[in-house]
Amino acid sequence: MAKVSLTAPASAEEGSSVRVSVEVTNTLGYHSSFLTEIFAGVTRILSKSEIILDGDSKTYSASFTMPADDITVLAWVERWAFDHWAYYGSDSETVDLYTPPPTTYHLSVS
């Protein structure tokens, strides 16, 4: 069974840098090449191809700028299967747009 685990913050302010990471664990029983991609919405923010030994894990990180709306982050992992890439696993998280509360001013009239 594939193990792909994405970590992302629950929310972020518009324009802030958002850091996400994905941990990929090789559960195949043999060494294999893995292609790991992370998408923020439709934009690919990471693409990494690397051999992961049997039972080992690799963690990859990437950042994006938070847009003016909620965004889904997707980690997509494929493994090399003889002559083509084959789906291995995926995970996704939604990062909600955080809007700080407005500043409240108290006026006193004398």
Image (cartoon, rainbow, N blue to C red):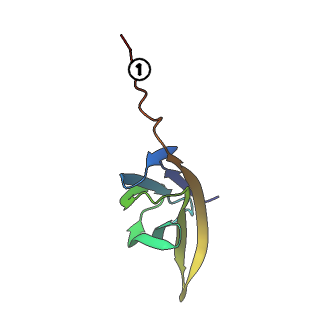
> What is the x, y in percent for residue 102?
45, 35
**Residue 25 in sight in this render:** yes
**Residue 33 in sight in this render:** no
For badge 1, the amino acid type reads His
> What is the x, y in percent for residue 68?
48, 58
Helix, strand, or loop for circle 1?
loop
Q: Name the residue under label 1.
A: 106
> What is the x, y in percent for residue 34?
47, 71
Q: Quadrant of residue 107?
A: top left
> What is the x, y in percent for residue 42?
52, 73
Quick one: 83 or 8, which is closer to the camera? 8
Q: Which residue is drawn at 58% across and 57% down?
A: 92
| Residue farthest front in this picture | 110
Q: Which residue is drawn at 36% across and 59% down?
A: 63
Does residue 38 sit above or below 22 in this rendering? below
Does residue 101 sit above or below 12 in this rendering? above
Q: Residue at x 36, y 52 (%)?
A: 16
Left/right placement of residue 5 relative to residue 110 reads right
Does residue 96 sit above or below 48 in this rendering? above
Q: Residue at x 65, y 58 (%)?
A: 1
| Residue farthest top in this picture | 110
Left/right placement of residue 106 relative to residue 88 reads left
